[in-house]
Image (cartoon, rainbow, N blue to C red):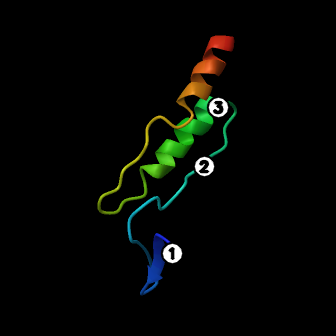
Amino acid sequence: MSSSARSYGRLVTAGGRVLNVTALGADVATARERAYDAAELITFGGRQIRTDIAARAVERTTQEA
């Protein structure tokens, strides 16, 4: 069963893990920032956004620089 569907031409959610947002960038930090910026444009009742995705990857690349 899907957590999202179309209803009257609109995308609707039934809850659960509904969407993944990805982005590209010159480096991991930029790609992460762009993905979170795009995720902020998506709204629906009960929306939750994990803020830890790719944080360790950004930390690793920052330490290597």
Secondary structure of the residue carrying tag 2 is loop
Query: Picture coordinates of residue 47 (x, y %)?
Result: 35, 56
Name which residue type carries label 2: Thr
Secondary structure of the residue carrying tag 1 is loop
> Disc 2 versus disc 3: distance between alpha carbons?
11 Å
Name which residue type carries label 3: Val
Q: Are marks 2 and 3 in contact (CB under 8 Å)?
A: no
Residue receiving disc 3: 28
Q: Can residue 54 be seen in this view?
A: yes
Residue lying at 57% horizontally and 34% vertically, measured from the top left: 54
First-in-chain label (2 vs 1):
1
Residue 45, numbered label = none
- Front position among marks 1 and 3: 1
Residue that extends furthest to the front in the rendered view of this protein: 1
Q: In this view, does 7 lie above or below 20?
A: below
* Pointer 2 local density, CA inside 10 Å: few below 14, some 14–19, many at least 20: few
Q: Can residue 65 be seen in this view?
A: no
> Disc 2 versus disc 1: distance between alpha carbons?
23 Å
Question: Is residue 40 or residue 18 the one in the foreground?
Answer: 18
Residue lying at 38% horizontally and 65% vertically, measured from the top left: 15
Q: Is residue 29 left or right of residue 3?
A: right
* Pointer 3 local density, CA inside 10 Å: few below 14, some 14–19, many at least 20: some
Name which residue type carries label 1: Met
Residue receiving disc 1: 1
- Front position among marks 2 and 1: 1
> Disc 1 versus disc 3: distance between alpha carbons?
33 Å
Residue lying at 70% horizontally and 33% vertically, measured from the top left: 26
Residue receiving disc 2: 22
Query: Picture coordinates of residue 51 (x, y %)?
Result: 44, 37
Residue lying at 43% horizontally and 42% vertically, measured from the top left: 50
First-in-chain label (2 vs 3):
2
